[in-house]
Image (cartoon, helix red, strand yellow):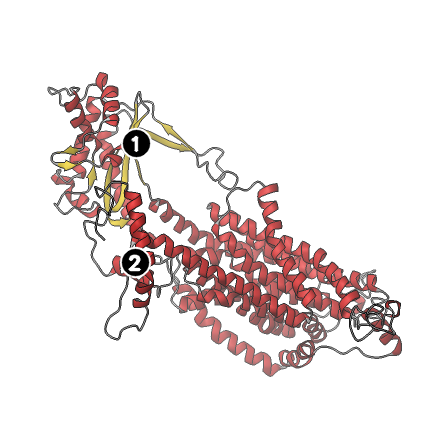
Amino acid sequence: FGAPREGYQRENQDKGDQEAEVKKFVKDELLSDMDDVAKKGKSDDTNTFYFMTAIIFDIFVAILIRDTISAVISVLLVYFYLWYMLGSLFLASTGMLQILLSIPCAWFLFRGIFQIQYFAGLNMLTIFIVAAIGADDIFVFMDAYKQSAHAGPEVNRNLQTRLSWVWRKAGLAMAITSATTCSAFLCTCVSPIAQTRSFGIFAALVILWDYILVMSLFCTSVVIYHNRFEREPACAIPYCCGCCTQGCSCDNQKPTPTEMNLSSFHDGIEIGMDKITKFFRTTFTDFILSLKGRVIILIVVLAWLIPAIIYVAKLEPTKTAEQFLNEDHPLQYSITIINEKFPQSSENPGLRTYFAWGIGKLDQGGVNQLLDDDFVGKVELKESFNLGPQCQRKLLEACDYLEGFNRAGRERIEKLVKRSDNGFFQAKCFLRSFNAAAKRDGHWDAENQVVQPVNITRTMADYFANPPRSLDGREVEYDLVLENVGFDGKDVKWVSLEVESSTLDQWSTLPEDTVRDVYEGMLDLARELDAFVGDACGAEGVLMTDQEQKFVFMNNQRIYRTSAISGAVIGVAIAFVVLCLATRSLLLSFLSTLSILCTIMSVIGVVTMIGWTLGTVEAILISILAGFSVDYVVHLAHAYATAYGEAHERLRSAFAEMGTPVLSGMITSVLASLPLFACQIVFFAKFGTFLCFTILFSWLFANFGFMSLLATVGPARPREAATEGDEGKTDAPVST
C-alpha cells in the first residue's frame, strides 16, 4: 500500500500508527468490495479470496457479533414456543426470566462463593443448554399442574393442597434429571485442562440454579397465574370491574380453576385431557404395546445402530489443520489455500523453538488455574549455570550444528529447521552478536576466543544498552536476541538458542500426529545438543519449548481425546447410579442406561458419517454427551417407576404423565440449536449440530426403544405393593 505513509519519513517510523492508517483505509474503502467479489457464484470463471493479517481481528469481531445474534434468536424461539405451549404470556415471560436468571445466579456461586477465577469461553454456551433444559423443567411443572386437575377432590380441596401435590410430583421428577445432568457435567472435573473443568462446573451450577428457580420463582408465578389470569374475569373487560364497568363487583369473582375442579368432581363431571396428552396415552401407547409396533421398532433400531457403531469405530483423530471459521467463509478458505495449496515460502516465519540451559523444572506446587488462572507455577533456575569460556565454546558448537555447518547433523537439521532465501538455516545464536559487542567494546579475549568471566557482566550490560545493529553484513534482530538471554543486571541466569520449524508455523493448528513428529524430533535434537553443552555450562538438562504453545496444545489434544472417552463413561455410570436411587429398580436403571448408550453411539456415529474427525471441539462435546442424553429417559423411567398396575398400565400412565412435557422439551431444545447451524465460528456451528442430534436421538430412543423394552419385559407394580403412607401418592417408587 506504499510505505512510508504520508507524513512519515521511514517505513518503521511509528509503525503501529502507519499500520492503523492502512487498516482503516482497507476497512473503509476496500473490505465491502472484497467481500462482494469473494461471494460464491460471483463469477463463473474465477474464484476470488482475500487474506490480510491487519484486518483478521476486525473480521473476527464482526463474525462474533453476528454469531452472538444466533444466541438471541435461540432465546426468542424458546420464548415464543413457551408462550404458544403454555398459552400465557405471563408464564412464558416469567419462565424465560427464570431461565436467564440462572446464569448470573450460577456466576455468583462460581465466582463469589467458590472463588473460581478461570471463566472459559465455553461457559457462554450454557445459555443454549439452560434454554433447552429450563424449558423442559417448565413443561414438566406445568404438565403436573394440569394433571393435578384430574388428581381427585383431596388434591383440589384448595390451591395449597393442589400446589403441594404439583410441587412434590414435579419437584421429584426434575430433581432426578437435574441431579443426573449436573453429575454428568461434573464428570469433566476429571480432565486436567482448566477450560474443560471450568465449563463443567459452571454448567452444573447453571442447571442447579435453574432447578431452584423453577421450584421457587416459577412456582410463585403459577400461583399468580392461577389467581389472576387463569380464572375467567368477572366482567367483559378484565380488571375493570367496579371502576369503568357498571354492574359488577370485584367481590363477585367467578370460581378459581381449583374450585371449579373440585365442583366437577362432586358433580361427577369428567375433566377432559388436551389432545397431545390424549395422543400419547392412547394412540402412541397402543403402537408401543402392539407386537407389530415393537417388531418394527426393533428392526429400525438395529438397522440404524449397526452402521452407527461401525462408524463409531471409524472415528479417528483429525489429520488436517483445525479450522476456526466455517470452511465456506472467504477468510477461512484463504487460510486453507495458503496452508495446503501453496508451498511454504522462506518469507513465512516458522514456529520459533527454543533450547534453553539454566532453567530447571517448573514448580507447580499450589497451582490451581481454576482459583488463580495467572499462577501456572514457579520456574526454578539452576544456580550451577555458568556462562564461562567452556560454555561459550560449546554453545558456539551448538550454533554451528543448528546452522548446518556440522555435516554429521545436517540431515537431522534439514528435516526440522527452516531455510532462508540465502540457504542458511533459520537459527538465532545470541552468542555471535554478543561476541561482536565484546570486540567492539574491548572486552574480547582474542587469544582464547571468548569473553572472560570477569568481563561478562559488563559486556552484557553494554550489549543490552547498545546492541550491535549488524553482524557479518546482516541486520541483527535485537528483540529476538533479548529473548534468548536471562540477564538480571548482575548475572546471566540462563541462555537459549532458537530455530524456526520447517513444518510448523505460528498460526496453523495441525493434527496431533504431525505436531508430535516435530516435537519428538526437536526433543532428540535437544538431547544431542545437551550432550556437549549441558555439562560445559554446569547445567545439564536442556529445556525445549515454543512460545506459541503448539506443543502444549498437542498434549491437550491427547488429553481431550482420552477425557472424552472417560467423561462419557463416567457420565453413563453416574446416570446408572442416580437411576438406581430414583427408581429403586436395577432393571429400569439398566434399560435406561442402555438407551443413553444408544444415544451416545448414534450421535458419534452420525457426526462421523457427515465427515467429522476427532479434533479438539469434537472431544469436548463427546465428553459432555452423557449430560445431554439423560433427561428424557430419566423422566419416563421415573414416571414408570411411580405408576401402579401391570406393565401396560404403567406404560400408559408414564406416557400420559411425561409424553407431552418430554415432547415439548425436545422441540424447544431443537429450536434452541437451529440458529447455531448458521454460525461462521466452527465451535458454535458444531455445538448446534451436536445438540440437535443428541436431543433428537435421546428422545427417539427414550420414547421408542426404552418404552418398547418396558412393554416387553417391564415389571408390574400391584397397588398392594405400596408402602404405608404411599397410598394415593404418585411419587413413591418401589423396588421391582
- The relative height of residue 333 versus residue 246 in the rendered view (above or below) is above
- The relative height of residue 314 versus residue 489 in the rendered view (above or below) is below
- The relative height of residue 416 versus residue 597 in the rendered view (above or below) is above
Q: Residue furthest front?
A: 7
Image marks 2 and 1: residues in contact by CB distance under 8 Å = no
Q: Left or right? Give the position of 725 relative to 28.
A: right
Sequence-wise, which precedes: disc 2 or disc 1?
Answer: 2
Q: Left or right? Give the position of 655 relative to 562.
A: right
Q: Secondary structure at mark 1?
A: loop
Q: Secondary structure at mark 2?
A: helix
Residue holding disc 2: 335
Q: Where residue 276 appears, x then y in whole percent? A: 67, 77
Q: Where residue 295 appears, x then y in whole percent? A: 56, 80
Residue holding disc 1: 541
Q: Amino acid at mark 1?
A: Gly
Q: Residue furthest top?
A: 454
